[in-house]
Amino acid sequence: MNNGYREVLEEISSENATPGGGAVSAMAIAHGIALARMVAKLTIGREKWQQGHDSASRFLVNSDEWIDTSIRLSEEDCIAFESVMQAYRMPKGSEPEKEIRSLSIKQANYDATKSPLEIMEFGLIALKSIQEMSQTCNSNAITDLGSAVHIICSALECASLNVSVNLVSEPEYSSEFNVRVEEIIFLSQQIKSEVSKIVMERM
């Protein structure tokens, strides 16, 4: 841990509205991915766990840029929320101004809803890849793998809240978003349940 890590936490805890729940969810996914990468390396580095080398190697290749992706998604979520705030600050003195402002708010809200959903989609991809290691990874690190899954699942639930809050003001596309949110949460909980069972068996 270094001062850079503390600076990120200080930024989150500041009075600024960003980074908020969506951005922090993406950062939490990065922590889960990093933990799973540690497990993969501990598996590949031990001859005893040769059976798990292939799945661990695949995960390391697949996830090579995922931490960067998590950071990018976090930054994009901040930008999306800031665009909503800017839209609400637009002038509304005349009818044309009101119309432009209304359209800007609608577009900004849509983007701010899509952003945490993209975070959820990404987190689900990471979960599926991590799950592939659960049966054959280094059992000395199996609880770390389980922790990675729990962290990412929690992040998906947090991101889903950010989807929901933005849908309140834009109900016309709520059905489209809600269906996918429910699917992702259902699939992620399935993975968590299956991996948790394996963790308990291999401890």
Image (tube, rainbow, N blue to C red):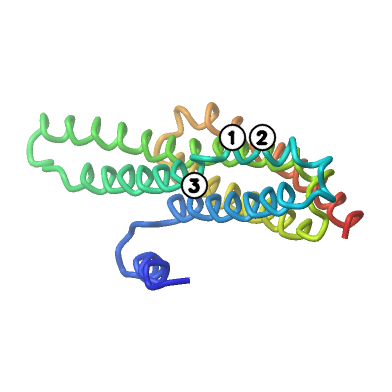
For badge 2, the amino acid type reads: Arg
- Residue nearest the observer in this picture, 37 or 23: 37
Going from N to C along the chain, the mark reached first, 2 or 3, is: 2
Classify mark 2: residues with Cα within 10 Å, few (<14), some (14-19) or many (20+).
Answer: some
Q: Which numbered tag is attached to residue 41? A: none
For badge 3, the amino acid type reads: Ile
Q: Mark 3 points at which residue?
A: 67
For badge 1, the amino acid type reads: Asn
Identified at 50% across, 37% down, the residue is: 117
Identified at 30% across, 45% down, the residue is: 79
Q: Nearer the viewer, mark 2 or mark 3?
A: 2
Q: Where is residue 172 in the image (x, y as percent from the top left)?
A: 45, 28
Residue lying furthest right: 201
Which image quadrant: the C terminus?
bottom right
* Inter-mark Cα distance, 1 to 2: 6 Å
Q: Where is residue 113 in the image (x, y as percent from the top left)?
A: 43, 38
